[in-house]
Amino acid sequence: MSYYPINLNLQARAVLVVGGGNVAQGKVEQLVKTGAHIFLVSPELTAHLSAIADSGIIRYRRGKFSPDDLNAMMLVISATNCQTTNEMVAQSAAERGLLCNIVDQPALCNFITPAVVERGRLQISISTGGGSPSLAQRVKREVAALINEDYGDLLDIVAALRSEAHSLIPDYEGRRDLLRTFVESEALELLREGRREEAEHLARKMLTESACQHFAAMTI
């Protein structure tokens, strides 16, 4: 099976996590970063999950999974060691047409989660299509060794540059060429040398030059 890669916006979306162990804890910690409204169901919780629930960051119901837990949910992740529960979650989610992931059981899922390398807002997803999570973790380690935090800093500058370019350079091709040129410039090397202000100055300089060229062409 070939999967379609996609990044979901879960901000303020209702997400159910079934399970209270370490695996479920990792899923909750990832979901909290997305701004999702998280509902957790499990008879027991790790100490850390209990603390998160007590803080009010997530909602928690102590008990076993019930199909009614899926009401109003957009997505569900089941991370339990009970096969009966996992199958019930998958079947109930399928009946409602929900996005469903059963950890480490791709046959019960309609989506799988990749291994992710994060550098600020930069996310690099690594997937084996469910074939080998262990290989995905090895590739993740190798990618993480190659892509350092400077790429996240570069993304911050490029994102700001892109936003400003929208107001100064109306045509898509002009903005695309500017951003491509900046990304391929010495900006990354400047960041690697701890010279962020110079990288930001380079971005402003290139934006000004590109905007001037654009308006000059319009007046000819």
Image (cartoon, rainbow, N blue to C red):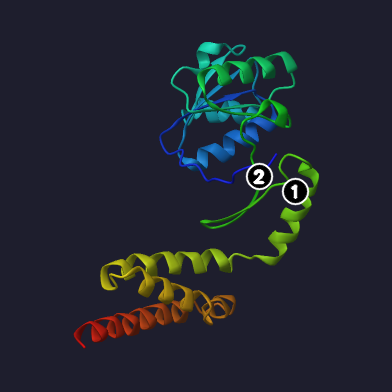
| Quadrant that contains the C terminus | bottom left
Q: Nearer the viewer, residue 61 or 172?
A: 172
Image side of residue 186 versus residue 12, left or right: right
Image side of residue 86 versus residue 207, left or right: right
Q: Which structural element holds mark 2?
A: loop
The residue that label 2 is drawn on is 114
Q: Is residue 189 above or below residue 5?
A: below
x 46%, y 38%: residue = 10
| Quadrant assignment, res 163 | bottom left
**x, y percent for residue 122:** 54, 58
Kindly check if marks 2 and 1 are in contact, taking CB atoms under 8 A apart as contact. Answer: yes
x 54%, y 45%: residue = 6
- Give the amino acid at mark 1: Ala
Q: Is residue 95 above or below residue 37?
A: above
x 69%, y 32%: residue = 23
- Give the amino acid at mark 2: Pro
Label 1 Cα neighbours within 10 Å, binned few <14 / some 14-19 / many ≥20: many
**x, y percent for residue 168:** 27, 73
- Mark 2 or mark 1: whose residue is earlier in sequence: 2
Q: Find the distance from the CA under tag 2 to the CA under tag 1.
A: 8 Å
Q: Is residue 131 above or below residue 58?
A: below
Label 2 Cα neighbours within 10 Å, binned few <14 / some 14-19 / many ≥20: some
| Quadrant that contains the N terminus | top right
**x, y percent for residue 8:** 50, 42
Residue occupying the far left of the picture: 219
**x, y percent for residue 4:** 59, 44
Q: Which mark is residue 136?
A: 1
